[in-house]
Image: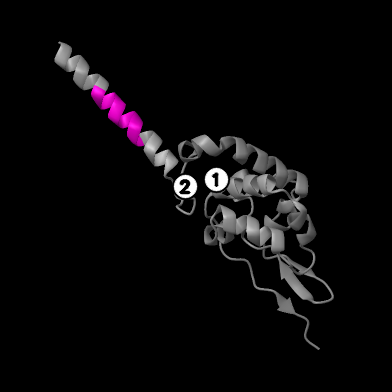
Amino acid sequence: MKFKLFCLVFTTFIVVGFFFWDSAQSDTTKPMKNESDFYFKMGLVKEGRHLIKKLGCNDCHTAGYLTLKGKVPEKKWLTGDTFGWRGPLGTSYGSNLRLLINNYNEDEWINMAKTLKSKPPMPHAILNAMSDEQLRAVYWFIRYLGPGGKPAPAFKPLTK
């Protein structure tokens, strides 16, 4: 009886140890598939969701978001758009942030966002001014959504 109890306690200890070891050693660039993978990041994910809504990222980076008055399921958010925004330099398209984010780890994302210079209508100055913690939250929210959609069309310069 004591031996069975010992085995049960020992096995539980090992399993819990592996869980915490894996969490502590996680690679921020590996794909994360479900909420349990984000257990220690859910506070950032929730803040990122709030920032994405508040800053209007879906307006350009989610197909149909403006025309549907925001009634687009979250699973379709930030997958890019084929609707072009024509300006004095040419036509820009809202990129697929869910594919883009996989090119960066957390620190690279923050650096890119702080130094981004983009074409209109992207308000890169807003990203440049965000705190590291805010950018970290946006990063983890987009990672939480996971890869999805196809790449948006490339920028098309004006032709004369």
Tell me which residue sits at (78%, 55%) in the image.
126
Q: Is residue 13 magenta?
A: yes
Q: Which residue is mark 1?
A: 144
Figure label count:
2
Residue 32: mark: 2
Measured as percent of width and height from the top left, residue 81 is found at 67, 61
Measured as percent of width and height from the top left, residue 52 is found at 70, 47
Query: Which quadrant is home to the C terminus?
Result: bottom right
Camera-nearest residue between 70 and 53: 53
Please tell me in which quadrant of the rendered image residue 7 appears: top left
Tell me which residue sits at (56%, 63%) in the image.
150
Work out whether 36 lies above or below 6: below
Query: Marks 2 and 1: CB-CB under 8 Å?
Result: yes
Q: Secondary structure at mark 1?
A: helix
Residue range highlighted in magenta:
10-18
Question: Label 2: few (<14), some or many (≥20) within 10 Å?
Answer: some
Q: Say whether disc 2 or disc 1 marks the residue closer to the N-terminus.
A: 2
